[in-house]
Amino acid sequence: MTNDMTTIAPHMMGCCPFGLFGLVAGFLSMAAPLGLSKAAAKEQGLNFDTHFKKTEGWYSSMRVGAKHSGYKVLVEQGTGRILGAHLIGPGSEEQINLFAMAMGAGLTANQIKAMIFAYPSFASDIGEMV
């Protein structure tokens, strides 16, 4: 993970993703990294956009009383390929599985945005993250 996420989870600074499969760590909230970090994507010379947001104001976080939640998703420019997803907060253990499935299937950010998920659910937030 990169320093952007440390504004949400200072205890995760220096944590790195474990390939395509994320490691879900339980702290005060669930945290789940998947795929490339920002630094690794830069090292590989990839051009990408970083989608980053604190989400404690989203309904999915407010309905369970989460005070700290957020995401950082790396989307390759031109292809829309998801390079990495880094999540913290309630439901991240479920959301990261959906990102793993989407990345493994080669879905683009636009294809993920077009999917319809049940609402309210943690899955329904994924389209806003890409």
Image: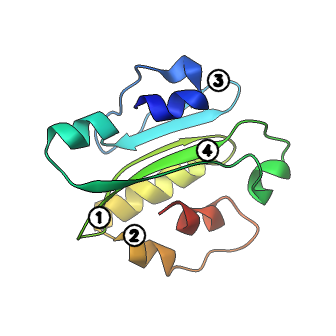
**Which residue appears at 36% of the width and 27% of the height?**
16
**Mark 2 and mark 4: Cα distance apart in space:** 18 Å
- Taking depth in this image into account, of 25 and 36 the one nearest to the observer is 36
Mark 3 or 1, nearer chain start: 3
Disc 4 marks which residue? 70
Mark 3 or 2, nearer chain start: 3
Disc 2 marks which residue? 109
Q: How many dots with numbers?
A: 4
Instruction: Confirm or deny contact between disc 1 and disc 2 (CB under 8 A).
Output: yes
Q: Single out the residue that lies furthest toward the left.
A: 45
Mark 3 or 4, nearer chain start: 3
The amino acid type of the residue labelled 1 equals: Arg
| Above or below: residue 57 compared with residue 114 | above
Of badges 3 and 4, nearer the viewer stands: 4
Count residues near mark 2 (Cα–Cα under 10 Å), then give few for <14, some for 14-19, many for 20+.
many
Disc 1 marks which residue? 81
